Image (cartoon, rainbow, N blue to C red):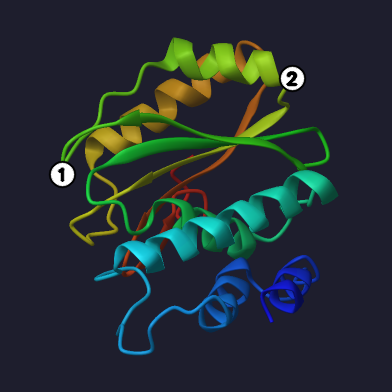
Amino acid sequence: MAKTTSQNLTKCRPATVRTCAQEAMPAYGVADGVQSWRYGLRARERATVDRALAILGRHLRALGDVFDCPDTVRDYLALRLGADPCERFAVLYLDSQHRAIAYECHFTGTLTQTSVHPREIVAVALKHGAAAVVLAHNHPSGNLSPSRADELLTQTLKNALALVDVRVLDHIIVSGKGSYSMAEHGLT
């Protein structure tokens, strides 16, 4: 059964990444009693989620999926960051056709903040040969509204990356309650 589910995960292009992951969990033995797959997971269940994310990550790298749909990007980032108990800052690096090159979680902070160093983001973008990026971080509190610091960081990174011809397509904030696209609200 696990093999069939694994095969189905690699054919999930029309569906969202979140849907694929949620469908995979019962096949790998995740308990039915868990109200939300994001919270209250036992060690075995967390390992299952990690395996599902690894499968999805291999799928993205193998196919070089084009992230041309904002929902797909948000779902992918929600899976990667949404359940983290402390604030993390990550970047999805894309080529000129918006195919995924790499996903890297760069900085980990506290419950309410993390320090981000623009020069490190620029250096990694150059290392990967990225033409565009999607910035992302989580709000463990569940509040999806960007802070003034989030807005300033987005502009700082946008300006720094523009110097090396890398476009910031979006800055997405995720939590267990959903996601917020700064681009959709005119903030990038």
The residue under the point 31% across, 89% down is 33
Rendered position, 110 above or below 12: above
| Helix, strand or loop at mark 1 | loop
The structure residue drawn at horizontal position 34% and vertical position 68%, both measured from the top left corner, is: 38
* Crowd around label 2: few <14 · some 14–19 · many ≥20 (10 Å): some
Q: Is residue 69 left or right of residue 183?
A: right
Secondary structure type for disc 2: loop
Q: Which residue is mark 2?
A: 129
Residue 176 drawn above or below residue 112: below
Mark with earlier residue (1, 2)? 1
Quarter of the image with the N terminus in it: bottom right
Disc 2 residue type (three-letter): Gly
Quadrant hosting residue 153: top left
Identify the residue at horizontal 33%, vertical 79% (top origin).
36
Residue in the foreground of this view, choosing between 151 and 46:
46
Q: Name the foreground residue: 94 vs 40.
A: 40
Whole-percent x, y for residue 110 in the image:
17, 37
Of 181 and 20, the residue lying toward us: 20
Residue labelled with disc 1 = 111
Query: Could you tell me if residue 74 is visible in this image?
Result: yes
Residue 101 on image: x %, y %:
72, 35
- At which x and y percent is residue 97? 83, 40
Can the viewer see residue 165 in this picture?
A: no
